[in-house]
Structure formats: C-alpha cells, structure tokens
Image (cartoon, rainbow, N blue to C red):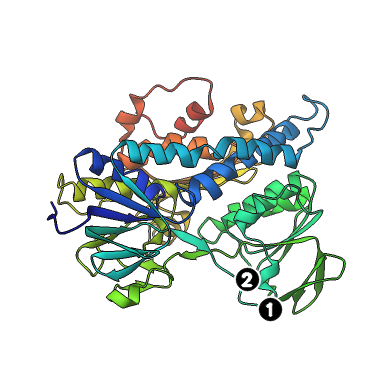
Amino acid sequence: MATTNYDFDILYLGSGHGTFDGAPTLAKQGLKVGVIEAGLVGGTCPNYGCNAKITLDFPVHLQHQVHELNPVLRGALTLDWNANLRHKQKIIEPLPDMLTHRMTDSGMMLIKGFGHFVDAHTIAVNETQYTADKIVIATGLKPRPLTISGNEWAMDSTAFMALDNLPANLVIIGGGYIAMEFATMAIAAGSQVTVILRGDHALRQFHQPLVNQLMLHLTDQGVTFLRQTTVQAIKKTATQRYEVLTEDDTLVTNGVLNATGREPNIDLLALDAIGLDSTANGILVNDHLQTNIPNIYAVGDVIDKPQPKLTPTATFEARYLAQLLGEHTTDPIDYPPIPTAVFSSPRLAQVGVSVTTAQAHPAEYRIVEQHLADNWYHQVSQSKIGTTILVFDQADRLVGATELSDRATASINTLLPAITLKLTAHEVNRIIPIFPTDESAAWKLLPHD
C-alpha cells in the first residue's frame, strides 16, 4: 500500500470511535497503523459522553418509571448523586485501558500528545515528526464556549458529569440534547433547574409538538423554561454564587451549564498550513470521506455532513474507511437511515423521513399517529405520555418513525429494520416478535398482510 519512505501506512489523529472501530482491522491486515491521542484513549463517547451519560441517567430513568407506577409501587426513590457519580466512574474508568489494548494488541502504535500538520504526509507531536502515506482526521467535536463576559464561570458537559454534588440551583443555557438530558438528571437529583432558550424552540431537529409535550412534562417536574432570552454575561459573587444576566432579569444560581452545542475540534491541527478545506461545521469530504488533499481522510463528528453526528455514525464510517483503505472496496459510502434519541425521561427518538418532510409532501407520504397511553401494554406501566408517529410511502412501506415515550428507543430500534431494509407488509408478516414486550407492541404498528 505505502512505500518504505513513510513511518506509517495510515496515521489516525484521535482515538475515538472513528478510529478504534476501524483501524484495528487495518493493522490486522499487516498495515502499519498509528494513532495520535492527547487525552484519554477512546475520545469523547466512552469517557465524557455516551457511556458516562447513560450510566448517570439509568437510575434517573428508573426513578421516573417507578414514579409512573404510583400507587402500585409506594414510596419515593431518592437519587444519591454522589453515589451515582462513583458508579459512573467505576464503569468508565477501565475503558481507556481496554481500548488501548484493543488497538495495541492488533499491532497499532499509540502516540501520546497533540498532533498538528507539518505537510500533507507529516504530523508533529511535541518535538517528534511522524510521516504516513495516508492520514485520517478523527478528532471529533468539543464544547463550544460562550462568547460573553464571564464565559469561564460556565461549566461544560464534561465538568457537569464530574460534579461530586449537583448545585442546589442550576441554570442551563441552550436547548439541545445536552440541555434536555441534563435538566432531566438535575431535577431528578433535587436541583432547581432553569433552562434558557435563545429562541422559541428546543430540540429543533425533532417534531415540535412532541418536543412541546416533553417540555410540558419537564415543567411539571419543576424545570423552568425561559424562551426568547439572551444571556448577556455571567458574574461570580462574593458568596460563591453566580449571576446570570439577561436583557430582562438577573438569575442568581449555584451553577451554570453551557449546553449551547459543540464545534469541530480542528483549531490546533494547522489545517490552513496545508490548505485543507473546512467550514465552521467541520472538515469537507467527498463521498469516499476524502478531503481536498487526496491522501487525507476524515471520519466521525469532525466532518461537515448532513448525517447525525453520533457514535453509531462514526462507527459506520470507521468500518467503511477500513474497507476502503484496506482496498476491499472502491464504492462510495452509502449511509443507511440513522436513528437518534434524546435520553430524557420520557425518551424522544426518531429515524428516517421526518414528520415535517412528510407533511410538506402529502402526495408522497402517509402519516399515522397513535396515542400510546391508549395501548394496553403502555397501561401496564401507567405511562402517561406516549405518542408514535409513523411515515409510510405510497407503497405502504415504513420510511420514518418518531416517538415520545419511556420506551421510545426500544420502539425505534425495533422499527429500524423495516425502514432500513424497506420491508413489505408480507415480509413484516414473516417476523414474529417475543410477546408481550415493548418490541412486539412496536411491531404491531406496521401494516401486515
């Protein structure tokens, strides 16, 4: 593949899912593969993102389900945040070593430190330069700082998930995944929570009527939402509290969380020095994940792309790139439908053609909406909130689904094969799910022969 003039056949910048889900395959083929990582091996998802978040959320979601079953289950479950944090650390602390061994056992070389481009084939790490025939940028995203006075007093998602104890009063700035998920956690742990939205809407990529249902539920739990509110500054007081200044008011709080989003982690890579094209949304690539410099590729959240910037997307790209660079395919990447979810209580999940798109093209799509609280299976758990909206094409094949419920992620995962494989009603009829389960309830929503 490469000549002996280079230190590596393939050199990865970053060690997240975009790397460890594909690069070991290349190393096992006999290619010389290196990975450069300045932080914890595994990147954001295992250490500061998905794994940490879902571990912290698990007792929160369980507490919510028990509350729904009142008075069948009596008594209140109290969430001990510090114990929850210790449990999270016990789960995630072994992951960097495990992932390191996965890569080094495959024959990869791990290089610790920050890397930046010297030229199209050379990366400098500290005082050492490494050359490679091909380079893959897999540096992901990082929290976007607030552009206001006092930004330094706002914690990011990583800091939030490392708090020994949650503040008694928490102000969250932003209306995306992190804002809704962490508001759910904090209110369950006993904090007073205020969420500040710059506009009217939260979770803009989701069906807004369902988002509004979720927000009303969180409001019932005690969360306060301030819409069309701009934060102008954050100040720290002499009493170790914080003042969040808006155009209309000053909020006094024990903690401020910046949940305004993430940005490509590319500012220290010296991309301009080699003329590599990027935007504010990430690195530009073609349908082979190749940048404008032919020997340099990008994978994962660092790419400017319409697909959801999620761990499963990065994994799919990593496996594709391993096939491409291992010379097992020359085909362009072909993305399947990619589901996404907000891990609030209840969950909000979706995949495929959106309700908004279907509503805008009534000649192409048929929309079916079901109120799940009327379904006997959801009555078993006394779920008070639940809506499923399915989108069908003119051949009556399922092409999109969105759901708000405690079981939304299970439902969307169950329906996913029908969407991805474009199953007909006859093919759906050939699938017999385990009954009675969440999955069987979801499968019954589809057309059958």
Amino acid identity at mark 2: Gly
Q: Is residue 137 above or below residue 346?
A: below
Residue 280 figure quarter: bottom left
Q: Mark 1 Cα within 10 Å, few/some/many (few <14, many 20+)?
A: few
- Residue receiving disc 2: 199
In percent of width and height, residue 321 lies at: 26, 50
Secondary structure type for disc 1: loop
Q: In the image, 325: left or right of 244?
A: left
The reply to whether discs 1 and 2 touch (Cβ–Cβ < 8 Å) is no
Extreme-top residue of the structure: 435
Q: Check the picture and name the quadrant holding the C terminus.
A: top left
Let me know if residue 337 appears in the view. no
Extreme-right residue of the structure: 239
- Residue receiving disc 1: 149
Amino acid identity at mark 1: Ser
Q: For the point 24% across and 43% down, which residue is it? A: 26
Q: Mark 2 Cα within 10 Å, few/some/many (few <14, many 20+)?
A: few
Tell me which label, 1 or 2, sits earlier in the chain.
1
Q: For the point 14% across and 51% down, which residue is it? A: 330
Secondary structure type for disc 2: loop
Extreme-front residue of the structure: 127
Q: In the image, 192: left or right of 374?
A: right
